[in-house]
Image (cartoon, helix red, strand yellow):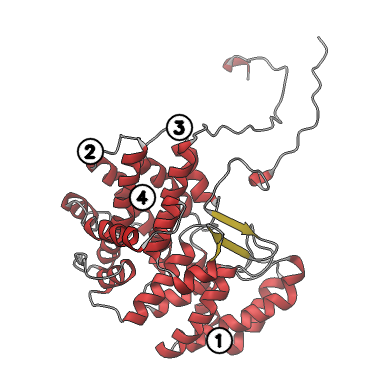
Amino acid sequence: MPETTHEPVKVFEGLAGVVFTESELTFIDGEKGILTHLGIPIQEWAEKSTFEELSYALLHAKLPSSAELSAFDADLKANRNVPPELLEQIKHYPAGANPMQMLRTAVSYLGLLDKDSEDTTPETKYAIAIRMIAQFSTVIAAICATVEGRAITAPRADLTHAGNFLYMLRGSEPTLEQARLFDIALVLHADHGMNASTFTALATASTLSDLYSAVTSAIGALKGPLHGGANEAVMDMLDDIGTPDKAVAYVTDMMDRKEKIMGVGHRVYKFFDPRSRVLRDYAAVVAGQQGKSHYYQILELVEQTVVERLSSKGIYPNVDFYSGVVYSDLGIKKEFFTPIFALARISGWCASVLEYTRNNKLLRPLALYTGASNQHYVPIEQR
């Protein structure tokens, strides 16, 4: 029998350039370094808005009125507490567990405790999204406290989302400036189109699974160092460099050996990540105030060296390049950077799942088969 011939098939490795759905939420032009939510530049969101307002805007695909935002903020504050059974479970997680493993398990357990978790109607999924956005801060703060051997601090309803998290994390109320800086960091990380974790959430949700399962899947994807862990690696690099006078030689040697410099380069951006420009300016101010200006000086020198050598290849610093320094200056340990990424991205995950499943289509891509053909089974005793 003659072999069947096929037209050549183009394989889009890593799904690069593949468009699989439409979205009203986030637009990215990587060539020009543009990021917008609802058509509004990320720089304006960071300067003029809050995490609460951006979360509402992503969930509803529109800016809220004053009354709508007040009601949304009240809903978030009313849902900050988590079941005591979950807090007890967190206290008994294995010593030395990765905080992202702990978060993944905690969110899955939240789903077990939620009597509405299997209800996938749009109204119930929206209510669950509100609870998850609110409760993520409490869960992550509880994980951080447990890892550090501290008592878990209960949330307060009189603080902003960002301010309340810093309060629970540190046990003392942050200054207004610190709360606002962290709020800006949350805004910058809230959504970023079809990144790996969002796509993973949609793949799970497209099976008509529940929202907790979709978010648990997303956390698993975010845990990977190629997605959520880069800012922690940047801090490791800064500690390795040590002092500004060693920065240029260190990074030049890395480039000569063609090693990856964490926080530099992006799958989408071929110009400066606009979020990195916002954080760079805040990092400069805060680093000076906190007496950690040597970190910022090292980053400046690394950025200058990298841009001089690699910008012609479209390689520039991304948001992770400066976010670690900002978190560090807020007193956050680097092992908690990735869970805090999730604290921000939960809004984007939930909004994208709600949007996609309104006109749901099961995600089922193809793979080009490159294995053997015309084979037959060989009994094990003949192999």
Q: CA distance from mark 4 to mark 1?
A: 36 Å
Question: Label 2 neighbourhood size at 10 Å, few (<14), some (14-19), many (20+)?
Answer: few
| Mark toward the start of the polypeptide (4 vs 1) | 4
Q: Residues within 10 Å of mark 1 (few under 14, many from 20)?
A: some
Q: Amino acid at mark 4?
A: Arg
Q: From what the image shows, is residue 354 above or below residue 81?
A: above
Q: Which residue is mark 4?
A: 104
Task: Please say if 192 is above or below 237.
Answer: above
Q: Amino acid at mark 3?
A: Thr
Residue 342 visible in the current orientation: no
Q: Position of residue 118 (x, y in %)?
A: 30, 34
Which residue has dot 1 on it? 297
Q: How many marks?
A: 4
Give the Cα distance between marks 2 and 3: 20 Å
Question: Within 10 angstroms of label 3, few (less than 14), some, or many (20 or more) residues?
Answer: some
Q: Which mark is residue 327?
A: none
